[in-house]
């Protein structure tokens, strides 16, 4: 779990540093663009004045106006263009001052990168919380967005259902055995004109932990994997299976339709929702952690091995929730170990959070 935590912290730090550097570079680029625009303003107004003078001279040649009238028109055109230059340069100077004082403002030319969590992909141009958008383009809402996405996190109690036994007779500590799950899920409305049924799909990393009772730990004997009593008093004995799975749920529940002139949405946040489905995937690793004292010294052992666990993971799962929180149940249909004479299957109950 420490490796996962370190990776998460490192990823967030790197994204933060990249975002900060990108913002700093954007600020310098935006100021450079504005200063170049100042030069362009002078060129444009001078070219416009030249065209106006040529038009006045043509009218004079055609005897449409007199010479004094032509001189008057040229003077007025020159004054107008001079004021245009002054006003347009002042506007740009103000933008530069705002940039230097407050950072980036408004829509500038070029591209921008935003980093975040959740389904803000109004134009389907965000992947895993990272969005690339051309600056200067309007952030226009998509009229009908049938697919959204969310970060998924779950945790709770974990245990084993053993063939012929109840949970009361479990070989594992009820409160000490826990699970965690982290992933990403997409949700798509099934029908065009109603939102009562949605399909939810994605990927998740599952971390299923088991703490054996009675000072025992798992031993791979070659033919099977069994619990045996440890030779010393154990301070901690924990067995963990890490899985990569691909969940699929059918989600039911009411929703509120919000209609605007430019778009419409179905809102399920303040509604009860029920999801039923399952998952399939792969076991990434199995490991065991032991803590005990020997000859007055504290010993920590981390044992990573095959342990005869099933490589293919599949099961059923479901949740019932309100807003972004749900009660979550998952049950592996595959046995934990391949060749053990007694079938054992992992089961978990906890809370699930869908952060969109």
Image: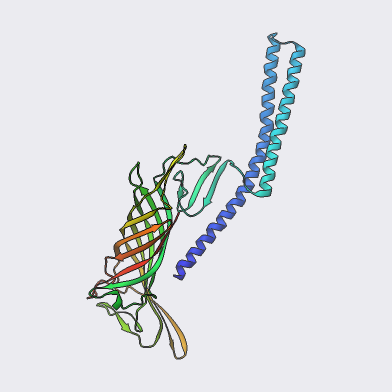
Q: Residue reaching furthest bottom?
A: 295
Q: Is residue 21 above or below residue 194?
A: below
Q: Of residues 161 and 236, which is closer to you in this image?
A: 161
Q: Is residue 153 above or below residue 302?
A: above
Above-or-below relation of 291 to 27 = below
Q: Residue at horizontal 44%, vertical 84%?
A: 299
**Residue at 34%, 68% in the rendered image:** 348
Q: Quadrant of residue 66?
A: top right
In the rendered image of this protein, does residue 317 appear above or below residue 163?
above
Q: Residue 269 at x, y = what percent?
A: 43, 52
Is 253 on the left-hand or right-hand side of 95? left
Residue at image point 47% right, 90% down: 296
In the rendered view of the protein, which quadrant contains the N terminus? bottom left
Which color scheme does this rendered protein use? rainbow
Q: Is 74 situated left or right of 191 in this image?
A: right
Which quarter of the rendered picture does the C terminus lie within?
A: bottom left
Quick one: 256 or 142, which is closer to the camera? 256
Q: Nearer the viewer, residue 220 or 346?
A: 346
Measuring from the top left, give residue 79's x and y in whole percent.
74, 25
Q: Is residue 342 left or right of residue 103?
A: left
How many numbered discs sit on the rendered protein? 0
Residue 9 percent across, percent down from the top left? 51, 64
Q: Nearer the viewer, residue 60 or 128?
A: 128
Question: Which residue in the rendered view is the most extreme toward the top?
Answer: 63
Residue 184 position in % (x across, y down): 41, 56
């Amino acid at each position: 779990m420490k490796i996962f935590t370190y990776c998460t912290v490192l990823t967030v730090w790197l994204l933060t540093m990249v975002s900060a550097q990108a913002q700093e570079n954007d600020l310098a680029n935006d100021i450079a663009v504005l200063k170049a625009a100042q030069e362009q303003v002078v060129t444009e107004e001078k070219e416009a004045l030249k065209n106006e003078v040529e038009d006045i001279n043509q009218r004079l040649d055609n005897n449409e106006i007199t010479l004094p009238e032509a001189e008057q028109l040229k003077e007025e055109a020159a004054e107008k263009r001079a004021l245009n230059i002054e006003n347009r340069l002042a506007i740009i100077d103000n933008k530069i001052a705002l940039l230097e004082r407050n950072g980036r403002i408004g829509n500038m030319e070029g591209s921008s990168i935003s980093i975040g969590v959740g389904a803000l992909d109004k134009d389907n141009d965000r992947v895993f919380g990272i969005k690339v958008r051309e600056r200067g383009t309007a952030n226009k809402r998509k009229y009908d967005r049938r697919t959204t996405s969310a970060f998924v996190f779950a945790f709770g109690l974990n245990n084993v259902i053993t063939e012929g036994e109840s949970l009361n007779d479990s070989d594992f500590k009820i409160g000490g055995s826990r699970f965690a799950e982290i992933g990403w899920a997409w949700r798509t409305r099934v029908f065009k004109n109603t939102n009562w049924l949605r399909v939810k799909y994605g990927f998740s990393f599952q971390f299923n932990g088991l703490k054996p009772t009675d000072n025992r730990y798992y031993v791979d004997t070659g033919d099977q994997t069994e619990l045996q009593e440890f030779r010393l008093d154990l301070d901690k004995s924990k067995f963990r299976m890490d899985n990569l799975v691909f969940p699929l749920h059918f989600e039911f529940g009411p929703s509120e339709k919000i209609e605007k002139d430019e778009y419409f949405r179905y809102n399920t946040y303040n509604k009860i929702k029920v999801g039923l489905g399952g998952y399939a995937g792969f076991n990434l690793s199995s490991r065991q952690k032991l803590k005990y004292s020997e000859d007055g010294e504290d010993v920590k052992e981390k044992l990573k091995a095959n342990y005869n666990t099933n490589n293919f993971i599949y099961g059923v799962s479901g949740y019932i929730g309100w807003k972004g929180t749900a009660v979550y149940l998952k049950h592996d249909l595959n046995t934990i170990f391949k060749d053990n004479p007694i079938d054992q299957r992992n089961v978990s109950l906890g809370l699930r959070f869908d952060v969109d």
